Amino acid sequence: MHRSRNLLLAAFILLLASPSFAQNSPQAAPPDPAAPAIPNSPTGLQSQLEEIVRMKNKKELKRREQLISELRIPDPDAWFASAFGDDDGGKLAATYKNSWEGFEDRFTNMMTDFAQQGRTNISVKEISLPAKPVAEGQNQPAATDAKPVTIFYSAAAAQGSESGWPFPGVYTYVQGAFRLVNWQTLYVLPYVKPTRMRIGGNVALAKLVQKVNPVYPAEARKNKVSGSVVLHVVEGMDGHILQVEVVSGPPELIDAAIEAVRQWRYSPTLLNGDPVEVDTKVEIVFSLH
């Protein structure tokens, strides 16, 4: 009887191993190598950024550097042309490639700060870039001729229930993952205006890297004219002076003050990792002593 059981067991094992049985048995479908690792949805972006900000162990730093590097658009020339057209796309791609390395360093430093501060609660929202205005004499493009709309998102990182701190740039889905476009690149478009910050004169003074002292006008010195000239100044994204306007001061000293301040240069001011214009005031003191 034991011999019969053994023969039946052996026959069953042979049946399982036979090709016909294997072909008819249900099997799990193999993973699709073309399937994106990150879903094209706000939750997909949220999870992608969460993985970055939650890495703070030294053993994880190389992995975080890799994840940040993968935020770069894989083929900027082709993607910007497809999203913004050939003319604007070429300019945008050139700026993107030239600015990415420095931007990536600043982004990495910000992620380090977020991780150390525990800002790991990520929120995401869809945003709209300004539409390119239609040139005079041109008609609005027909719906059939319109390019597919590129969806962009902004993101913020919070600690607990407090207000979130914005991530730099905007995010869009390209080749199976979310990629990052810095605002410096988008400011190439004339219809996307740079962000401008207003800061106090003392705060701006701390970022001054090149200062030229005014030459005291000989006529004003002869007439013993002294006092302060207050100027309204706009700094460009690169820290150079874009605009100088007079607020107050002795007329005899104004030209000398303006000439000096036009040569000043500041270190770039960053907002969410992107350079911005700065609106501030400068006081130039002329003293006879």
Image (cartoon, rainbow, N blue to C red):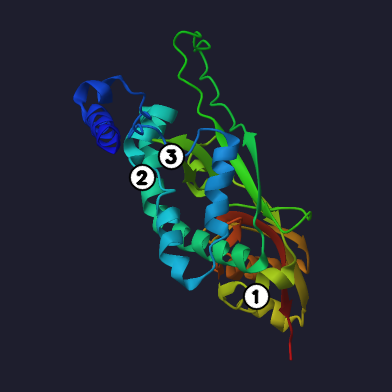
Q: Can you tell which quarter of the image residue 281 is in?
A: bottom right
Along the line of sight, which residue is nearer the eye, 71 or 257? 71
Of label 2 and label 1, which has the lower sequence position? 2
- Residue drawn at 33 percent across, 38 percent down: 77
Above/below status of 188 relative to 112:
above
Q: Nearer the viewer, mark 2 or mark 1?
A: 2
Above/below status of 32 relative to 241:
above
Marks 3,1: beta carbons within 8 A: no
Please say whether residue 232 is visible from this viewpoint: no
Outermost residue, bottom direction?
A: 289
- Residue 94 bears which disc, if any? 2
Residue count near mark 1 (Cα–Cα under 10 Å), binned few <14, some 14–19, many ≥20: few
Marks 2,1: beta carbons within 8 A: no
Find disc 3 in the rendering and name its residue.
Answer: 37
Secondary-structure class at tag 3: loop
Q: Nearer the viewer, mark 2 or mark 3?
A: 3
Q: In x, y percent, where is residue 270?
A: 59, 59
- Residue 206 bears which disc, if any? 1
Residue count near mark 3 (Cα–Cα under 10 Å), binned few <14, some 14–19, many ≥20: few
